[in-house]
Image (spheres, rainbow, N blue to C red):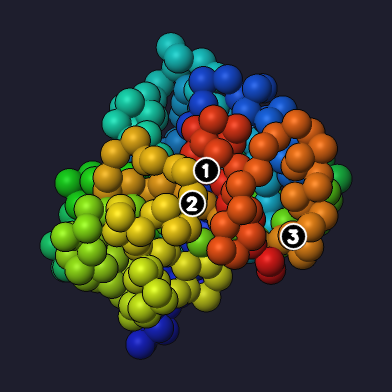
Amino acid sequence: MNASPGTPDIDYIDHTVLITTDLAAASTRFEALGFTLSPTSPHMLAERPGGPPLPTCTANRCAYFGHSYIELLGVVDPTAPDPWGVHQLRATYPGLLMTLGSRDVQATADRLHAAGLASTGVRALEREVSTPEGPRTVRADSVRIDAEHTPEGALQATQHHTPEYVHQPRFLTHPNGATGLHSVLMVVPDGDVDSHEERYARMLDADVWIDGAKRVVPLRHGRVEIVPQSALHELLPGHTPAAVPLLAAHTIAVSDLVVARKLTESNAITTYTTPDGFYVAAEDACGVPLAFTQG
């Protein structure tokens, strides 16, 4: 789908990313949190659309929700090529990585360059997945925003060409009742809220709302929330981020908060009350707090 005139090319949060060197352990933990995960899927990457796909050092398992997902990105072969710089990303960013959904990734790349937000060129990603009809290839094109402009965490935009192989119906039902990514929370120094708000408004070509202590960039699916560090205790009581600015937490919408919380606690995972639901601490959610809210 190409963006129409006047329509933002970026209009949803496609997925959040947690990098791990132990994909099996991360998968076990997210299953205990009540997520249904897809099978392990190795990554292939081409330097340009239509180019030859090459093996990389990573594979993933994902919790899919129909229009968004959480990706557990595992470094499964440290000696294999690392064209996306995953080793460096893991060393640089202690929080989340975030992928935004684009209607037209070439238009996104052109707009980011024109706005002075340098990026990579468009790159093609492939990975083989199993389907009830047999193996199929997931194809997507992505552009990454230059790290100079994203001190809080790595950002990229992706256009999916085979969404039917990503969000397969058999993976969309979760014991915890998860229905989608509600939001990503960015924590920034108190005096820098305005500058981060303006930057995200430019990157996403979107308006910004004020919601209490938060500045909110709403999208068709999901929202980016920007909060000053001094107000974080109101949203995630007891959590201290590793650094700021940081993509410090993500929130999942669920159909029934009581059911999701009981399931989490039944698996010996501690939960903490928030104004909109509850959250699981970073050490119990693969390094980044995971919050739950009513869908």
Q: Residue at x 47, y 73 (%)?
A: 219
Sooner in the amino-acid sequence: mark 3 or mark 1: 3
Q: Give coordinates of residue 176: x percent, y percent.
A: 78, 51
Q: For marks 3 and 1, give the CA distance.
A: 17 Å
The answer to the question of whether label 2 and label 1 lie on touching residues, with beta carbons closer than 8 A, is: yes
Under tag 1, what secondary structure? loop
Q: As rendered, which of 132 and 250 lies closer to the eye?
A: 250
Which three-letter amino acid code belongs to the residue tagged 2? Leu
Q: Which residue is mark 2?
A: 236
Look at the picture and state if 244 lies above or below 216: above
Disc 3 crowd, CA 10 A, few/some/many (<14, 14-19, 20+): many
What residue is at 28 percent from the left and 72 percent from the top? 201
Q: Residue at x 40, y 83 (%)?
A: 7
Packing grade of label 2 (10 A; few <14, some 14-19, many >=20) is many
**Label 1: which residue?**
289
SS of the residue under disc 2: loop
> Callout 3, which amino acid?
Leu
Compute the Cα span from label 2 to label 1.
8 Å
Q: Is residue 125 visible?
A: no
User: Where is residue 236 shown, x and y percent of the image?
Assistant: 49, 51
Which badge, 2 or 1, comes first in the chain's sequence? Answer: 2
Residue 257: assigned label? 3
Left or right of residue 134: residue 142: left
| Residue 133 located left or right of residue 59 | right
State if disc 3 and disc 2 touch (CB < 8 Å).
no
Locate the C terminus and report the quarter of the image it occupies.
bottom right
What amino acid type should be assigned to the residue bearing mark 1?
Pro
Residue 280: name its quadrant: top right
